[in-house]
Amino acid sequence: MKFIPLLLSGLYRNLTRTSLIFAQVVFVFTLFGTLQGLTASMAMAIKHTHADRLFTGSRLGGGDLLPVSLAEPLRRFPGVARTTFESQLPCTFQRPDQYVWALGVDPQTYFSVYFENQTSAAALRKFTALRTGGIVGERLAQRLGWKVGEHITLQCFVPKRDGSRDWGFDIVGLFRQVERPEFSDIVLLNYSYLNESRAVNHDTVNVYGVQISNPADAAQIAHIIDAAFANSAHPTGTASDAESAQENFRRIGDVGFLSRTVTTAALISLLIASGALMMRSIRERRAELATLKAIGFTHRRMLVLVLAESIGIWVAGAAVGLGVAEILLPRAQDLVGKGFVPLPVVALGLTYALVGGVISGAVPAWQTLRMPIAAAARR
């Protein structure tokens, strides 16, 4: 008798039970792939941060602002190569639910510190010369259908001096975030235009970007900067690019611990449930299996037949679950950038599926080997 038809007949004998085990495996490995992929995406995002970049903000928290006059003292610290700043302007466009994030920046320094944001020399010249000029990220321009040369009006949460919340600007060029394109979903405005026009928070910025000459000195330079302003009216908190990313992820929670805990519990539950269903399947097929032994099936072939059923369901379900996770993770790009399930996670998941299939099928297979032919045939 052919082995594959026997294997398939065992799986199709009770399609409801097979489908139930398969669905459980798919769910668990979707969970496994999503959580492990999220953890890997976070680690990759931290790895791809810039070791030569520091961020200086207020030590009092994200809602507190720093004076723009801090730019020059920051440039004079030993080891600091360049500094720039940004002032945030949250807005909407045409609809209340269509958000646009604008930043007031210094055109002369912004692109030298954030060199991964690239634009043309002509666009940068226009941006510098035109007070109401704006450079739009390619992702944002694509999302809203904006073109170079258009005049755009945003409705922003910060009012202007005249009481209006309508902020207009002229698109003089586009920029591309070459490392993480999803981060080009913003618009850059002239800080001078923003600062002169807004009714509140004059001469302040949200954060400074500090580029240093030697990445090995990052911790020391950060300490020196914060110590210098510790007793001032505006104490600072300086962190490296990687530390800032880690802090953002910490606010979400310990995803690594959650991933390990949840997937371990899910895999154990799956082992118990699938093992119980496999044992029930074997009990219902005792007479059929006894017949196979009677016509000459060896212990090894019986063992392989039972284990192949279990392993086949687990591996196929794991492959589908990991595929679903790969589809779901890009939806987390606002959280971790580009979400993905890396190949090591896929390999680990399939290995777990192989081991799980062996374990859940081991007891039913052992029972099959110990099954007396005469007793089983009478059932």
Image (cartoon, rainbow, N blue to C red):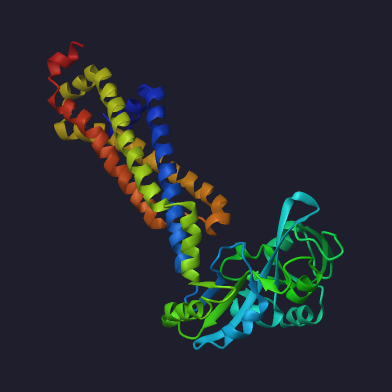
Relative placement, left or right, of 279 versus 75 is left
- The C terminus lies in quadrant: top left
Q: In the rendered image, is residue 48 in sight? A: no
Residue occupying the far top of the picture: 378
**Res 102 quadrant in image:** bottom right
Please identify the quadrant where the N terminus is shown: top left
Give x and y (percent) for residue 30: 44, 42
Q: How far across and how far down the image is residue 288, in percent?
A: 24, 19
Left or right side of 248 for 264: left
Residue 220, position as x, y percentages in the image: 43, 80
Q: Residue sitting at 54 percent across and 81 percent down?
A: 211
**Relative height, residue 281 to residue 192 (above, below):** above
Where is residue 16 shown, x and y percent of the image?
41, 23
Q: Residue furthest right?
A: 162
Residue 330 falls left or right of residue 23: right
One can see residue 143 in this view: yes
Task: Depth check: give the residue in front, 209 or 260.
Answer: 209
In this rendering, the answer to whether 106 lies above or below 40 is: below
Q: Quadrant of residue 148?
A: bottom right
